[in-house]
Amino acid sequence: MAQDGPNVVFNLTGSPKRISSVYVYDKRGTELFERQCGTPEYYLRRVESQLLSWYAGDIVGLCGLLPIVELGAGTSEKTRILLAEYAKRGARCDYFPIDVDTETLSYSAQELVSTFPFLFVHCLGTTYHKGLRALPPCPGARLFMFLGGSIGNMEWQEIDALLSELFDCSTRGDYFLLGADLDKDPAIIDRAYNDTAGYGPRSTLNMLDHLNCRYGGNFVTENFRYRSKYNPRMKRNEVRIESLVDQAVTLAALGITVSFGAAELIDAEVMWKFDPEELGSVLDRAGFSMVRQWIEPTYRYGLFLLRHK
């Protein structure tokens, strides 16, 4: 991620200032996010896991026993549900997890191969775009996965760019399993990102420590606070980091010093909540046709199985 330095400079010197959400995910940030996922308020992982448990057999039945490529694999916890379906059939599976958190990726790979004897893990510790371009040629179809509602953590131009990259790096007949959160009661969403245990805020503020470590920065986390609110008009949750005082922060490795005013907000994360029809249209324009969708009715979270046209 060292080559991302110019983007960090661009984002922190723009207006409004911004930090890419990719900086949530170092080892500490991943640990905090995993704890957030276990809180009662954070429904996304729990509901997605339920959907996978209910429909993993259907997914394998529709796709077949294909090599799996997963964007943002993290701990691969939910992927285990699908891998268990392969194991039931005694099938070999080549699994290509892509994630910037190389430490978690390596640890998870060791755990997976000890659990599933016919699994072969090929870690790609890099960004989505670079990981997709680094995939080896495949003689048959593959199953690409992007779970956790992570597609909602991107701006629309980033979503379009990723779908375009995925289309270019896949071939006709490949499948794409997408997990996406849907628009719903704002109170449910607000609770999810403002958990009472405080793991969501700590995970986001860890971005500052990550920048300190990577770029020789001197962010003082205590001088900032987490702000999260759902915007029903835009259909997205907006996470910002607020500077509590007038302050200047230096990132020595990038040769910049950035001033923050008291109450100034830094854009940190967005979580789009989609309309299923609109999302289907976006995916169709990107070259993926809908095969099947499964939507949990209480929390309105969906799994969408698509195919490269």
Image: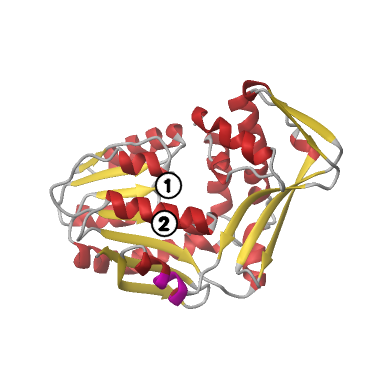
Q: Is residue 295 left or right of residue 220?
A: left
Question: Is 278 colored magenta in this rendering?
Answer: yes
Indicate whether 244 appears above or below 65. above
Residue at image mark 1: 72
Q: Position of residue 278 (x, y in %)?
A: 46, 74
Q: Are marks 1 and 2 in contact (CB under 8 Å)?
A: yes
Read off the residue under disc 2: 147
Q: Is residue 240 left or right of residue 273?
A: right
Hey, what amino acid is under mark 1?
Gly
The stretch drawn in magenta includes residue 152: no
Q: CA distance from mark 1 to mark 2?
A: 8 Å
Q: Is residue 146 something that shows in the picture? A: no
Q: How is the image coloured?
A: secondary structure
Give the image quarter of residue 13: top right
Residue 289 position within the rendered picture, expressed as x and y whole percent measured from the top left:
30, 69
Q: Secondary structure at mark 1?
A: loop
Residue 33, how many percent across, how many down? 56, 47
Q: Is residue 150 above or below residue 100?
A: below
Quadrant for the C terminus in the image: bottom left
Residue 262 is left or right of residue 102, and the answer is right
Residue 226 image point, x, y percent: 73, 49
Tell me: residue 164, above or below residue 186.
above
Nearest the eye: 99 or 202: 99
Magenta residues? 277-281
The dot on residue 263 is none
